[in-house]
Image (cartoon, rainbow, N blue to C red):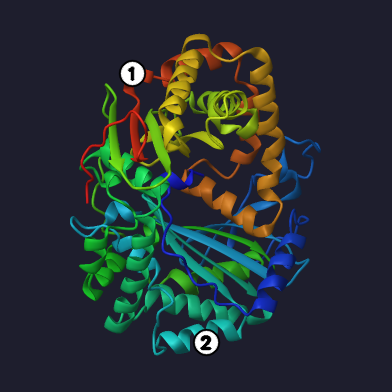
Amino acid sequence: MTPPFFSPRTHSFRLTLAACCSVGISLALSALAFPAQAQTGSGAAVRGGNAATATAAPNRQAPNRFMNIKEITSPSGITAWLIESHNVPLMALRFAFDGGAAQDPPGKAGVANFMTGMMDEGAGDLDASAFQERVEEIAMRMGFSATRDHLFGSFETLTVNRDKAVELARLALTKPRFEADAVERVKKQISSQLAFQAKDPERVAGRAWSRLAFGDHPYGRPTDGTSASVLSITPDDVRAYHRRVLARDTLKIVAVGDIDAKALGELIDKLFADLPAKAELTAVPPVKLKTGGAMEVLEMPVPQSAARFGFAAMGRKDPDFMAATVVNQILGGGGFASRLMEEVREKRGLAYGVWSAVAPMAQSAVFSGGVATKNAELVKSLDVIKAEIARMAKDGPTQKELDNAKSYLVGSYPLRFDTNAKIANELLGLMVERLGIDYINKRNPEIEAVTLADAKRVAAALLKGDDLIVTVVGKPDGLKATPMTP
């Protein structure tokens, strides 16, 4: 998962669920964590060689020892991953389509995000009010969101209401109304959000960094759009995006909970079979970040300035990606255990917090970070950050730092699987990144295999201080503002 800066906050989806049912589902999903191995269904085809095995030794490196992950194929040929558990009568479904905001038409930044806000605004014969009432009546939770490269959807339902929930989700996916009055309503909501975000130095710095780093590439556009682009979006824009992007050939699906393989095969056919067979995606080219570094300072009358910084990194399939992940954990990804937090906050008291991350995308990858502090301390904070980047690049980590980082990354991995919703999210992430159904067996050994020599070599290759791209928003002492870009 990428940090908020690299997955801009999408239009907030409505949690259409009565409060008591919401609490009940959340608690029940927690109770379903690490389901026991279930009986294999007899309908949909189930592939052998699952990620989990009955003989897996109980150790912290194998969260899947609690899970039997099956790959099923529906009667129409749609594949999905399933973790079956009948302990509690609930099911969580997660799915994704390739595309995301990178498929926004030129001049229409924010269409993908806009569409996700429209998916519960009426479908089939139900207008927005009737649709949302039906969702609430059956205690169903449903949501959609967009990132740069993907559209995500989810729903959670009680087993007793599963058929009704599937029908509502099917209507939302395949027969959305996208009516003019709903478009105007959502347009006002998103415009209000954008106006609020325009006063947030950290959000503005993040958007400015993407524009400065990626330029005219689709990654340089704000995922949630601009005030002008959102106002220009029409119902036809939303319909055209939906028609081009939501298709079965890029679909990834994960289900966790009270459903067997046969029932899931039938469910996903009902839910997705009416979508087009193939998406009509515009090719998004690979993009390399500019070298030589850059800085942009945008003035905002606030007492605290925010900065974003970063440069190119290794992609997710690069053999050095895990070593880069470990190096980042030591430098700025490990919270209070990281060098940046130690040097910026603990030793000097320059800022409350500072972070960094390695963020892979479909057509690029970046090392990124951020800091926010009072105007008088921003330049000092950036100087310390640059010095620590240079020190890590030159000397690499110590053996103790390496051991501690690896121990944390390995030991904390099972915490990503402690509820059914988190299990579904994590597995969908593996599908989206095309890492394979057995990746949870491989992930921790890959981290354990990183040596001190690997970490030092990758730190030197990754941390190119001369290529650092920085955006600052606020009124920082000692930095001259450059013109604000609309």
| Residue 313 location, quadrant | top left
Q: Mark 2 or mark 1: which comes first in sequence?
A: 2
Pick the residue in front: 3 or 475. Answer: 475
Residue at the extreme left: 107
Residue 239 in percent (x, y) is at 27, 72
The residue beneath circle 1 is 466
Q: Residue at x 36, y 50 (%)?
A: 148
Tell me the kind of residue under disc 1: Asp
The residue beneath circle 2 is 133
Q: Is residue 305 left or right of residue 391?
A: left
In this rendering, the label closer to the viewer, 2 or 1:
1
Q: Residue at x 63, y 59 (%)?
A: 421
* Residue 99 in view: no
The Cα–Cα distance between marks 2 and 1, rounded to whole angstroms, is 56 Å
Residue 222 in percent (x, y) is at 31, 51
Secondary structure category for the residue under label 1 = helix
Tell me the kind of residue under disc 2: Glu
Report if the CB atoms under discs 2 and 1 are less than 8 Å apart. no
* Residue 128 in view: yes
Secondary structure category for the residue under label 2 = helix
Label 1 Cα neighbours within 10 Å, binned few <14 / some 14-19 / many ≥20: few
Residue 200 in percent (x, y) is at 40, 52
Q: Residue at x 35, y 25 (%)?
A: 468
Q: Residue at x 45, y 87 (%)?
A: 129
Tell me if residue 237 comes above or below residue 440 in the rendering: below
| Residue 382 location, quadrant | top left
